[in-house]
Structure formats: C-alpha cells, structure tokens
Image: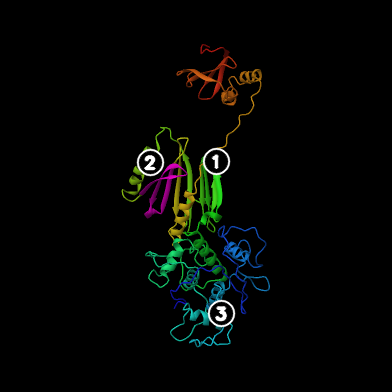
Amino acid sequence: MSILNKTTTKLISVLILTATIPLTVLSAPAATPTITGATNTQPTASPIFTDVADTNPHYFAISQIKNDGFIKGYPDGTFKPDATVTRAEALAILLKAAGITAEKSVVKLPFSDVKDDSWFYSSIQKAFALKKAKGFEDGTFKPLNPVTLPEAFALAFSFLNIDTSKTIVEGTIYQGLDSKAWYAKNLQYAKNTFILSPTLLSSSTTGIFSADYKITRAELAEIIFRTRQVKTKGGALDITTSWTTTDNKENFWQLKFPSSWTVFKGSANSVLWNKKNYQAFFTRMWPTGVRLSLSVVENPDNVGAQTYFETIKNSYNSEYGTGKSVFIPTTIAGRSALKVAVAENRILDTYLSLPNKKFLVMYGEYGSAPIGEYLKKELELVVASYVYVEAPKVEPKPLPPLDERIQTLRSKIVENGGWGEVKDMFPDKKLISTDGIGIGTGPVDYYFTAEANTTAKIERRSSTILNIKDGNSSAF
C-alpha cells in the first residue's frame, strides 16, 4: 500500500535529507532559492561529501541541495549515497522540510509496530494526523521498510504540490511499470518531464523499471532536485543543460550531446554515438545503442530545398514502402529541413539545407531494447540543438616575387604534375583555349596570366607543362 493518500499540501520552501537516527535537520531558509544547472554539471563549490565523487551521476543534485543549505551528511563527513531510505525517515524528512513540527501528542497510533518511545513516533503521529500517511491492513506501519520508487514520487509530488490528476497514462510508462496501478499518473508525469528516466536509477540502464525498487539516498536527492526544477520552471527539465558541445566547422554543424556519448569526426563524415562496453566502433548497432551520422552532400544541379526533399520522400517510399515513413517539414536553426521517421526500422533522419546550396544529412538510429524510446528522445534533442557554423577561412599564403614565380614555372616544364604544383602561384590565370585532340594523350589546355604576360600549354591528363611563351596566344 502507498504511504500517502491524495491530499496535497502547500509548496514547501526547503527540502532536507537527514542522516541516521537521531535525525539532524537544518533550519529552513526564508525563501526557495533559484535552481540552476542540471544533473552531471559540476558546480563551483568545495567538495561535498567524502563518499560522493564528482563522477557520481547524482553529484550535482546532491551538491546543489547541500550548497543551498538543505541537507547534512553524517558526522564522519560521508553521505552514504547508496543507502536506502526507510518509510520513517522519508516522513521525517518531508515533515521537517515543510516546516511542520512533529511534537508528540496524546493521540495514540493504531500501528502495532510503532512504539511511543521510538525516535520516529512523533513524525508518524503527525503525518497520520495530517492524513498523509497510513498503514497496512494488518495494523502495522512498517517504519523501517525501505521506500519504493512509486512511494518516493508520491511523497515528492505531494509535498511539492505537483498535481498529476490530469496526466494521461500511456499504454506503457516504462517496461516493468503497471499503467493501471495507483502510481501510474505520478510516474507517467515524471517520465513526461524527465524527472524519471533511465539515468535516474542505477538499476534501469536498459530502460526496465521495477515498482518494488528501493530508492537510495542519492536517488531521493535526485528526485527532489529534479522535481523542484520542474516546479520552478513550470515545465519539463532541459536535460541538455549539462550536455557537451562539439562542432565540425568544415561540415557546417555544431551540436550538443550527452556526456556519455562518443564523437568521431572525419573530413566528410562524422558520427556521434553512445559507445557501449567492448564496442570497438560505431558500425555495430547495439540494442541499447543510439547513433547519429552526419554528412554534407553536394548539390551539382543546384536544386532548391523543396525539390530535394521531394526526391528524398520518393526514395524512402521506394526503399521502405509507401506509408512506412513519416515526413515532417520543419525548420532547424532557421534553415529548411525535412525529418523522416521510420518507426519500424527505428530510424530518425534529418535533411537540412545549407546556405551554400549543399545539404547536411543526419542519419539517426536507436536500439531495440526498452531504453530505445528514451534514446530516441535524446536523439531528437541532439538534432534540435543544431547550430550552423561557417568553415574557417584559410588566409592565402604571400606569393613570391613575380620573377621568382616565372622562374619556378619554367623549371617545371615537361615535369609530370608540374602544373598542379605551380598553378596557384598565378591567381589571375584564365583558360583561353582547349585543343581536344592534343598530342595523342588527351586534351591540351592553354592558360594565360596577365600578371606575368605568359601563356602556359598544359597536357590535362598528367598536369604537365608542355611549354610557355610570352603574350596571350595558343599558337605555339
């Protein structure tokens, strides 16, 4: 049974995690401070607890709540992030966080396992009087039982005044969670707002959850932190806040991606993917994997974006079958784009027009494991973070004096490939004539440079300078 009924209370101004018995609680500040940042972003603060390294996935949540004056650890400087939280501790935490004094009264509790000399007696007594806690049918309260995943969210949402009554529950919240259970609306809301995700629990990295899972102290801190962010912002978490930014200016893109992903950058093609254990390269797609491949394609016919997109639609209908692909015309970073989703093949592709008439193609794929749905959301956010960046301009090298360049040109006569080595020394060169028959090895081109007042006769296939002469003439 749940430890809560559906009663909600006013928004609290502090949230406090306690240590072990006896409870040590900080006094409440005057107002709720502003929350900034997101999970996994390291704050600029002194070390928080000796057993909470900055590599801990809940480091930022724990440190923010501590730095804001909401929690204390143990006297030895530890936090014990992996320890579970009992039902009694959870009630004491939220009662004190709400500013409710849990003084013992003469009212007797109906629970056989809650003795009046227990440290948690007054907390349970107060919570019971407020109708925020109830026991089990056998007359017990089970105060030392660990708090489960659904119970943790019920507590957090009740005390933070999160109303989930109008939430529409999907057929599957996450695999392992019952969409018809008492907790369904709470956990569906938590999923919709990214409070509940596979990154929250160490046990859900494949996307499978359990309603019987026992929440740890670190995970409870994360739930409280994320819930407060959602309440403060009035909307879903921006999980990209803590992501890494990378770019490939030569390919005109900048993207944000989760810190757990890996990047491969090539001169023409790049890939972002969440590298799994023992995965040597991105070419292998694992069931729990996700991958975004990026390529710039030429546009030799100089077609417009809409014409190009129509060609793309025809290609998908031909390859995957008519009606299998969903086409979504949109704009990304102010550029015309076409998104293509092929759910059956777990494909999410994007085609983006570039200012230089080329197109950026982003092929997205996500694995078939239960976590795939969450990875798809990450993939969508990576693509949505796109920013157009210009390729760096290469400053031309200073040219040698003209007489020195002409001397170099003469030295390359009849040298195989010589024209390719010196042609950039004459930036004003122009093709003035072509002899299609040439010397029997293919066409011969004639280039004139006004700066040097010289014409060069070039065998095209081998880029060989056959001869040069003064003036503008192809008569050699």
Span highlighted in magenta in the image? 326-351
Q: Is residue 25 magenta?
A: no
Tag 2 secondary structure: helix
Q: Which residue is mark 3?
A: 102
Residue 358: give x, y in percent of width and height.
45, 37
Q: Is residue 77 visible?
A: yes
| C-alpha separation, residue under disc 1 versus residue under disc 2 | 24 Å
Name the amino acid type tagged 3: Ala
* Most common secondary structure along the magenta stretch: strand
Q: Is residue 345 magenta?
A: yes
Q: 318 or 261: which is nearer to us?
A: 261
Name the amino acid type tagged 2: Phe
Taking the spot 64% from the left edge, 26% from the top edge, the residue there is 398
| C-alpha separation, residue under disc 2 versus residue under disc 3 | 65 Å
Q: Is residue 265 above or below residue 49?
A: above
Q: Which residue is mark 2?
A: 309
Specify how the rendered protein is coloured: rainbow
| C-alpha separation, residue under disc 3 versus residue under disc 1 | 61 Å
Tag 1 secondary structure: helix
Taking the spot 53% from the left edge, 50% from the top edge, the residue there is 256
Q: Which residue is mark 1?
A: 249
Tag 3 secondary structure: loop
Label 3 with label 1: CB-CB less than 8 Å: no
